Image (cartoon, rainbow, N blue to C red):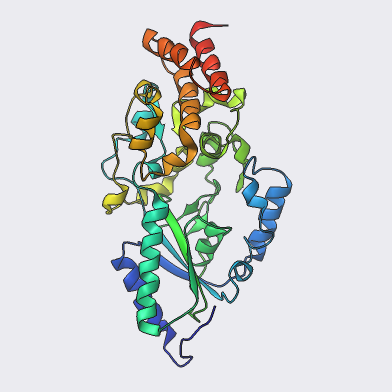
Amino acid sequence: MKNTVNKEQDTRSLLENIRAWAYELGFDQLGVTDTDLHEHEVHLVNWLNNGLQGEMDYMARHGTKRSRPQELLPGTTRIISVRMNYLPPDARDADQVLEDSSLAYISRYALGRDYHKVMRKRLQALADKIQNQVGPFGYRAFVDSAPVLEKALASKAGLGWIGKHTNLLSEQAGSWFFIGELFTDLPLPLDDQSTNHCGSCQACIDICPTRAITAPYQLDARKCISYLTIEHKSVIPVEYRKAMGNRIYGCDDCQLVCPWNKYSKTSALPDFAKRHHLDDTDLLTLFLWSEKEFLKYTEGSAIRRIGYQQWIRNLAVALGNAPASPEIINALRQRMADTSALVQQHIQWALEQHCGN
């Protein structure tokens, strides 16, 4: 990376311009921090040493690059961190969907377009605007796409604090937002780190269906429904299947109960509007999708990354938790003959919930 900014330039004025451009591009907040993540590195190492990452082997790759930005991108001295609200304005009430066990619950973040594409495009546009003013400079954009401690950087940049559920929380916006970064060599002034406002509240710990939040600020990913339905590629442990309820892609319980989300704001971007009625579709309809239909209706969506077999696996568990009906039992039995051994195990479990052993 090479910084070509004139050292005499008013960097505060530049940062004001960068913030203004960020808002123009649809970001809801922008902050700047340095590369020192020592405290967070200690937490990460302990978490990995305890095996709490489950099958997410990538969390342990790349050595210290995840917690040392200057190693990931040499020359980095500043991180520009941004957030973007994603809550769909027209989605059915989340609690209503969770209470109706015949419906499929999909995490609110996945109801619209894939956020990776939406945010990366805008981060590149932000970098282009900066370059138009200062000339060539060193940078690289990241959106959950490389070994980056995004929440730690966002917290240091003043975008929020890491809550007891380990999600980022903002006094102004709750937690329904995405974050992304520009690693850069620009000598920008730093923003103040956010302070923690969780207090004595532990609503997220109490509500977690699988008790995955084992202590304040400690998440055992192996128990987390978001992990089990998205990152976990193998057999879902039987002890967590009942607790999964109708959650087929992700889980929002710890966010739904958080009192800070009374300040959350819906997204103004059409990209994050619900698509294909995935906010309240019944489980059986989704279970009956062919692979071709799955690919069609999840095109441009974050959901597609789990693949069709994992999608059906998750739905089989949810159907095992749904009210029994001849239609569900027949669909499960018919699917048993034309699916993978992995999915068959979950279908068998679902049938046992309705028909016994």
Name the one closer to the observer, 61 or 221. 61
Q: Quadrant of the C terminus?
A: top right
- Left or right of 285, for residue 214: right
Residue 307, x across and y down, in percent: 47, 36
The residue at the point 54 percent across, 11 percent down is: 352
Up the image or down, 110 lies above or below 134; here it is above
User: Which residue does the image show at 28% across and 54% down from the upper left?
Assistant: 269
**Vertical placement of 3 versus 220: above or below?**
below
Which of the two residues, 203 or 278, is positioned nearer the viewer here?
Answer: 278
Is the N terminus in the top left, top right, bottom left or bottom right quadrant?
bottom right
Q: Position of residue 46 (x, y in %)?
A: 71, 51
Work out whether 150 lies above or below 290.
below
Instruction: Work out whether residue 160 or residue 312 is closer to the camera in this orientation and state it.
Output: 312
Residue beneath the point at 35% across and 62% down: 27
Is residue 256 visible in the rendered structure shown here? no
The x and y percentages for residue 101 are 40, 22
Residue at image position (50%, 21%) is 339
Q: Position of residue 193 (x, y in %)?
A: 52, 67
